[in-house]
Image: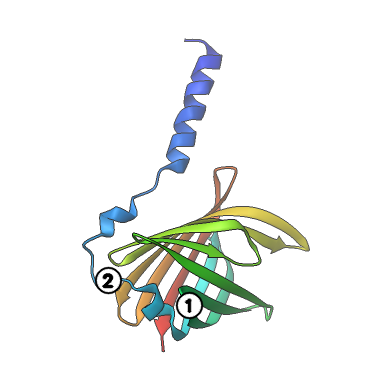
Amino acid sequence: MSAGRLLRGLAVCLTLAACSSPSVENYRNSTPTLDLYHFFGGRSQAWGMFRDRNGTVVKRFTVAMEGRREGDSLILDERFQYADGSRQQRVWRLQPQGNGQWLGTAADVVGTAHGEVAGNALHWRYQLQLPVDGQLYTVDFDDWMYLVDERSMLNSARMSKFGFTLGEVSLFFRKE
């Protein structure tokens, strides 16, 4: 086999591996059942961190959230407080599409986030404009949320660029 064919084959395998992810359908029968309106309606808190690809904690933060329903939309106002004292706000507009599908928009989300709920899980995929040292970088998020009980949720999101993992965001949500 030629070196060129070997490299092309390796590139295809790496691309497929980077795109693979468990299906949200794997959680269809998992309980408690996640209802986004219920869990994110009202006030909730989150505590999180970003770890780089080596596992080093780079950022720690808390999030105060308030969700409200406007027609069929769920508006989620997130206010981040980072350990270094910096602050950030993101306001999501989540729109149900039926059959567990959701679309989401926010000012720093490129295009539209695509989500799916099944059982106790929510899987989001989106691109986010991330400010780093005065510049904006567009990164890909593969974001999973798992309802633990009526008031608790775990979140794990893989952040990547060009298919290469940059790090992982972990959060714990607690509904007030």
Q: What is the number of the mark on residue 33?
A: 2
Q: Amino acid at mark 2?
A: Thr
- Residue located 43% across and 79% down the image: 40
| Disc 1 target residue | 71
Give how far across and how far down residue 57 sits, in percent.
55, 66
Name the residue furthest bottom.
176
Label 2: few (<14), some (14–19) or many (≥20) C-alpha neighbours in 10 Å: some
Disc 1 residue type (three-letter): Gly
Residue ranking furthest to the top: 1
Residue in view at x 34 percent, y 82 percent: 151
Instruction: Indicate the quadrant where residue 52 lies.
Output: bottom right
Mark in the foreground, 1 or 2: 1
Q: Residue furthest left?
A: 29
Left or right position of 101 against 12: left
- Which residue: 52% across, 77% down? 76
160 lies above or below 10: below
Q: Alpha-carbon distance for marks 1 and 2?
A: 22 Å
Is any part of residue 54 visible from this angle?
no
Front residue of 81 and 91: 91
Q: Quadrant of the C terminus?
A: bottom left
For the point 61% across and 53% down, which residue is it? 139
Image coordinates of residue 167 in percent, x first then y, are 54, 56
Examine the rendered structure and indicate whether residue 53 appears above or below residue 119.
above
Residue 37, horizontal then vertical, whole percent? 40, 77
